[in-house]
């Protein structure tokens, strides 16, 4: 896979646009090598504590949660506009607990440059991240209208702030 190292800032606008439209892939891997991919539509790229940070939200009920908790690592792989929409739909609606969604969706992977988490080859932007802070959401500090709209089952996310160790583009 021919990738170019870029500033994490180079792809921010496109990354946020993809999150808002079709989504992006959150890829995780535990220390034993078990991997998973899920679609995310919420996230942020920022500078916090003097570090480039990618923030993602994962519900504790998701298979991805146990993997990221084990390894403390994740990658965000961002497809181009209108690309991989079928895979994004599957990875956003099916669990990887009992199936390999990479295989199911025909997603080829390649090793990352900074971490053990694989990257999805057919994407355009790649962020390899190490968790530097995590926080389970406390609904007492969340606007009630957001709770009512997004958390009717009270299945609140854990928020992960990952230091971007490598940012690459294809």
Image (cartoon, helix red, strand yellow):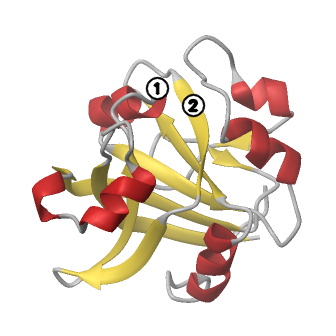
Residue 43 percent coordinates (x, y): 46, 66
Q: Which residue is mark 2?
A: 36
Q: Which is more toward the observer, 160 or 168?
A: 160
Using a 10 Å C-alpha cutoff, classify the residue at mark 2 as few (fewer than 14 neighbours), some (14 to 19) or many (20 or more).
many
Q: Tell me which residue sits at (47%, 40%) in the image.
A: 116
Quadrant of the rendering where the C terminus is positioned: bottom right
Residue 120 percent coordinates (x, y): 71, 48
Residue 86 percent coordinates (x, y): 87, 45
Q: CA distance from mark 1 to mark 2?
A: 8 Å
Dots 1 and 2: beta carbons under 8 Å? yes
Q: Which residue is mark 1?
A: 63
Quadrant of the rendering where the N terminus is positioned: bottom right
Q: Quadrant of residue 91?
A: top right
Q: Quadrant of residue 3?
A: bottom right
Residue 73 percent coordinates (x, y): 37, 45
Q: In the drawing, does residue 163 fall left or right of residue 140? A: right
Q: Is residue 64 above or below residue 32?
A: below
Q: Tell me which residue sits at (16%, 80%) in the image.
A: 49
Q: Which is more toward the observer, 45 or 4?
A: 45
């Amino acid at each position: 896979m021919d990738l170019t190292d870029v500033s994490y800032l180079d792809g921010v606008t496109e990354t946020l646009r993809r999150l808002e439209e079709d989504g992006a892939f959150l890829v995780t891997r535990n220390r034993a090598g078990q991997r998973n991919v899920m679609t995310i539509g919420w996230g942020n790229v920022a500078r916090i504590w003097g570090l480039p940070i990618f923030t993602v939200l994962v519900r504790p009920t998701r298979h991805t949660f146990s993997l990221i908790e084990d390894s403390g690592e994740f990658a965000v792989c961002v497809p181009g506009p209108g690309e991989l929409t079928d895979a994004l739909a599957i990875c956003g609606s099916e669990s990887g607990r009992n199936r390999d969604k990479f295989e199911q969706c025909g997603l080829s992977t390649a090793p990352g440059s900074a971490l053990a988490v694989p990257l999805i080859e057919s994407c355009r932007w790649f962020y390899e991240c190490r968790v530097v802070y995590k926080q389970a959401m406390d609904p007492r500090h969340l606007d009630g209208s957001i709770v009512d709209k997004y958390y009717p089952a009270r299945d609140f996310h854990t928020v992960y702030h990952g230091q971007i160790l490598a940012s690459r583009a294809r």
